[in-house]
Image (cartoon, grey):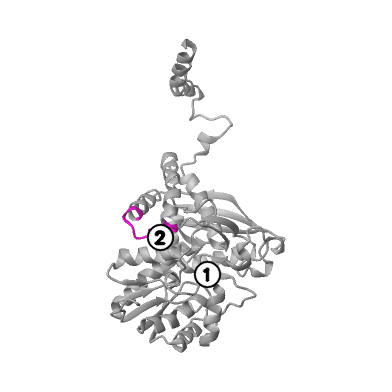
Amino acid sequence: MAEQVKKVVLAYSGGLDTSIILKWLLEEYKCEVIAFAAELGQGDDLETVRQKALDTGASKVIIEDLREEFVRDYVFPAFRANAVYEGHYLLGTSLARPLIAKRQVAVAAAESADAVSHGATGKGNDQVRFELSYTALNPDLKIIAPWRQWQLKSRQDLLQFAETHGIPVPVTPEKPYSMDGNLLHLSYEGGVLEDPWREPDPEMFMTTVAPEDAPDKAAYVEIDFEQGNPVAVDGDRLGCAELLARLNELGGANGIGRVDLVENRFVGIKSRGVYETPGGTILRMAHQAVESITMDREVLHLRDGLIPRYASLIYNGFWFSPEMKLLQETMDAAQENVWGRARLKLYKGSCQVVGRKSTRSLYQPEYATFEEDRVFDQSDADGFIKLLGLRLRLQASVGKKE
């Protein structure tokens, strides 16, 4: 027996899973369903999404433009920390889920709904990201996870359900990619991509040109940072979403930001994912370049040691946890002196730092030079090295005695 539910707010995209879920909720729970769609820069025609939800049976459709909030409050904080999961993944999907969940909870409160629902499978990470966020923000809400409840076991079952109920879906049996997009990235998984040896179809990519097809002339870009946040591109001060969109366009045109990896999901399964993150790739490299001349050595090294833990918290769904709050405050404190400009060269998939400068730079040429200088007494290094080597000398002497 389905749990008694009066009204549920569904995270709705209009894709295969959530289209089926909307109809399934109506049949299984006999409840009112409000479809919530977030505009995160995914490029969908949201008015078409609205009409599809209404046609499928939603009592109400709420669409919110969250692009600025997404980049300002989720993407930029993560990039202030140089967050990257398992060396390659820039967390595009992981960062979007807590924001969607947050707005679902707010809509539930405004509409007097007693439940929320999502389209994440029981094998993936998104179920954890959504549900930990729901729990942190309103533990009294009932959570409905259809993939863990219904008898539909595969994408083929969903396609059959859609055909039976007359629900149009954007996926065909011949091309069953699962795609997720926002201003930070576009991801692909499932279908033929489940074979980790098979190269992705070149026609699959939508936001980046193939590096070999990129222009034969290099492009240059300059990005300004204030307290670790990007604020301008080539001297133009831009809003958060506009700035990332500008870098996406530039990076995509030059074949920047493609990643093909097998990652470790939180549930213990390895998963093959292909990502396009053009603007984010440029942004992270530029940020690191400015940090290199403005951050104290020990602060930078300490912060870098925290990045794997910080990235795992995001990936695993703990955005609203106490430990995440503590880590974010630490990451932001490390950015107080990160002001400056980075210059990058983009060429056929390569993103290379070619310049960095700052009025707060800790890099002093008169100290760093290999030429003659008047500020550094090289003989001072004698005592420095002797003290550093003292414990090694003592250890060696013990070895000789033995």
Query: Whole-percent x and y of residue 50?
Result: 46, 84
Is disc 1 placed on a helix, strand or loop?
strand
Could you tell me how far apart the alpha carbons at marks 2 and 1 are, in whole angstroms? 18 Å
Q: Nearer the viewer, residue 58 or 187?
A: 58
Task: Say what amino acid the circle numbered 2 marks.
Answer: Gly
Instruction: Name the residue carrying label 1.
Output: 181
Q: Is residue 234 visible?
A: no
Mark 2 residue crowding within 10 angstroms, few (<14) / some (14–19) / many (20+): many
Give whichever of 193, 345 is nearer the camera.
193
Chain-order first, disc 2 or disc 1: 1
Q: Quadrant of residue 319?
A: bottom left
Q: Is residue 88 left or right of residue 297?
A: right
Q: Is residue 80 above or below residue 213?
A: above
Identity of the residue drawn at 47% across and 72% down: 40
- Residue at the limit of the structure toward the top, as seen here: 401
Q: At x 48% / y 16%, what residue is drawn? A: 396
Element under disc 2: loop
Residue 57 % position (x, y): 43, 87
Above or below 108: residue 365 = above
Q: Residue at x 56, y 34 (%)?
A: 369
Q: Is residue 159 visible?
A: yes
The residue pinned by badge 2 equals: 317
In the rendered image, residue 78, in percent from the top left (x then y), is placed at: 44, 57
Q: Which residues are magenta?
A: 314-324
